[in-house]
Image: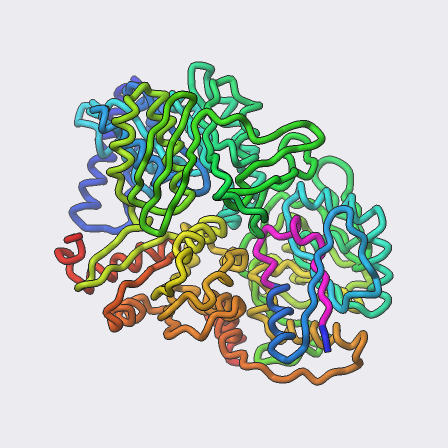
Amino acid sequence: MELRIVHLYYNLMNTYGDDGNVICLKKRALWRGIEPKIKGVTLGDQIDPDWADIYFFGGGQDKQQIAVSKDLVKVNSKLLKETARGGAVIFSICGGYQLLGHYYKPHQGPELKGVGLIDVTTLAGSRRMIQNVVLAINPLLEIAGKHKTLVGFENHSGKTFLGRDATPLGEVILGGGNNGEDKTEGAFQGNVFGCYLHGSCLPKNPHFADFLIQKALKRRYGIIELKNLDDDLEWQAHEAILEKFAPNYLRE
Amino acid sequence: MSKVRWLVALWIAKLIRRIIKIFNFSGGTALPGLIALKIDANFVIQAAKKLDYSIIITGTNGKTTTSRMISEILSKDSIKVLHNRAGSNLKRGIASTITEKAGFFGKLPQAVGLWEVDEAVMPELVLEIQPKILIVLNLFRDQLDRYGEVETIRKKWQKGVENLSQDSTLVLNALDPSVASLEKNAKAKVISFGLSDLNQLQTQVARAADQIFCPMCLQKLDYEKVYLSHAGIYQCIKCGFKTPVLDFWAENISFSAMSSHFTIKRQSLEKNINLQIGGLYNILNAVAAFSVGKILNIDSDKIKEALNGFEAAFGRMEKIKVGNNFIYFYLIKNPTGANEVIRTLFKDPESKNVLLALNDKIADGTDVSWIWDVEFEKLVGKTEKLIITGIRAYDLALRLKYAGLDKPNLITTDFKKAIKETFVLKKDFYYLPTYTAMLDLRSKLTKTLGKKQFWEE
């Protein structure tokens, strides 16, 4: 069995330590005897919509995000939609998340066009939200794990608002979340997920990592029961944040 | 009137310094400066006028080491230097240094101001101090929880460079496109420094490289090869922006964890340097310091002597004796800095005893995501005993687990326990902490060893 991973715009959308998510997907597959295969896609490359089980799309800086938006419009937007329809999972963070929405509207200049795979729009904000984040996972997702929380670190000025077809990934316990207003954080729509959690996100949220891996494998192998791993250290890192910022959720 | 205000600010600041000392308040080093600036907003401007001239140095990595090198060089030429200490590189820190060193009637005994300055405050201080020389070392991702983006800093720097008068000299690292691009905005004379040694070039741009677009026209930069991170030989096919011709450079380079040897060149000038600290990045720092010495017309042999006798700065490749063994401190604070420390330390095949410490205080950066951009994979099979500590010890231990390292001997948020564990072995140990973790480790070491023994080395 193999897990095929595509790292979208790996050399541009990589400013905030998000590469850890790809490392995490790779290792958690490997530790279970599943062979991880990783391909990078960057400016000028064309996505093969049949190949990958899971895509990762991280956060980058404004300049990089503009270049990526322009590249997506050419052909990859269409191919990403096609691959999502085919059952592939897409997991995105920060700038990647924004670009999977309809558009990003900066203070000045033209809108940055997004892929439109998640029904969200992002507007430039005046205050940058930079802090630790804890969120209670949306129970609709049925993510099983030691804790029902996700932890990470946000660093964004864009304010993301969810449309009717997108569902929040969770409710903010600590931090600004999507827009600092409605207490939501992240979004999902079908197999497409987005959030503002740097950290890196997946290593210290192992339940979420496995949830995504299982979903990704489903495309070619059906429902697979994942072997349990020794996640003591993962949970210790997770709990260190809960203990500091959301002790009530530690006891649950 | 302004003179009186300045003096009042000085006196009150001096008084506060005295109080801090008497009551032994810790961490109050910037407070006198802060108060002085509250009383007289022009405190730094006025003080700068009392100096012969000033030198400002900024950049993500190497500020402390390079300014200490420059200080040594100037001292060799009997120039008295007023230098702010590491960790107080904001405006208040500079004001604090002035309030400490100025006489009761405001006389400054030192002739030259040497200021290492935080990246974000450089433009303001250039405007206020009007330095004779401005040195920009490099720009890497660092403390993004403070700055938001790397590009934000580069834009600020463009403003800072515009504030520099045409009588000044701007010293730029030619290998870093973010830094080299500042030439465009400069009225000042520009001096470029760098390296020129094919053997030190790597074919791959680091995972944590930040400037892969042309800062001039946003086209993707063409990298032939790099020395470290995104610093190397680059070219933009669209607008022609490329690595500038070097005025000063190092060649014939060899280095280890403890020392480095190279030749610094400029046209007909050629000096062999034996530095008592290792790392390619420190060679680059030495070239920057050398060029400053030459801009000030200091004799080349004096510069050479100063560099050869240079000892590591606070927490940067420092060594501390414990019994018959040594603890070596290597500060790590951002991906590029950490990658270069790893590259330098684990060059030779023998494995080492390592203590890693991660804090998330403001001075460290409250976001620890950056550890995922550090190539810890290169430590696999190279550590004998491994101890993980710091406020975010579990995050760091997790990073190392995913890098493929064996289970550490100890993971603890308790610095004391971590230090004790390193003593048990009675072997040399390498401490790799973030900034405030370094301060914590040092103070705990002092307590454990007793001050006298601690400072013997």
Q: Quadrant of residue B118?
A: top left
Quadrant hosting residue B225: top right
Residue drawn at x 44%, y 23% as measured from the top left: B127
Give the residues in magenta: A3-20
User: Would you say B27 lies left or right of A176 here?
Assistant: left
Q: Position of residue A152 (x, y in %)?
A: 56, 63
Q: Is residue B156 above or below residue B378?
A: above
Q: Is residue A102 magenta?
A: no
Say which of A64 and B77 sits in front. Answer: B77
Relative side of A106 to B131, left or right: right
* Drawn side of residue B171 relative to residue B31, left or right: right
- Image x and y of residue A228, in percent: 61, 84
Q: Quadrant of the C terminus of chain A?
A: bottom right
Looking at the image, residue B293 lies above or below residue B386: above
Which quadrant does the N terminus of chain A fall into? bottom right
- The answer to which of B344 and B88 lies nearer the viewer is B344
Q: Position of residue B78 (x, y in %)?
A: 20, 24
- Does any portion of residue B106 appear in the rendered image? no
Residue at point 38% right, 66% down?
A: B389
A158 versus B349 height, above or below: above
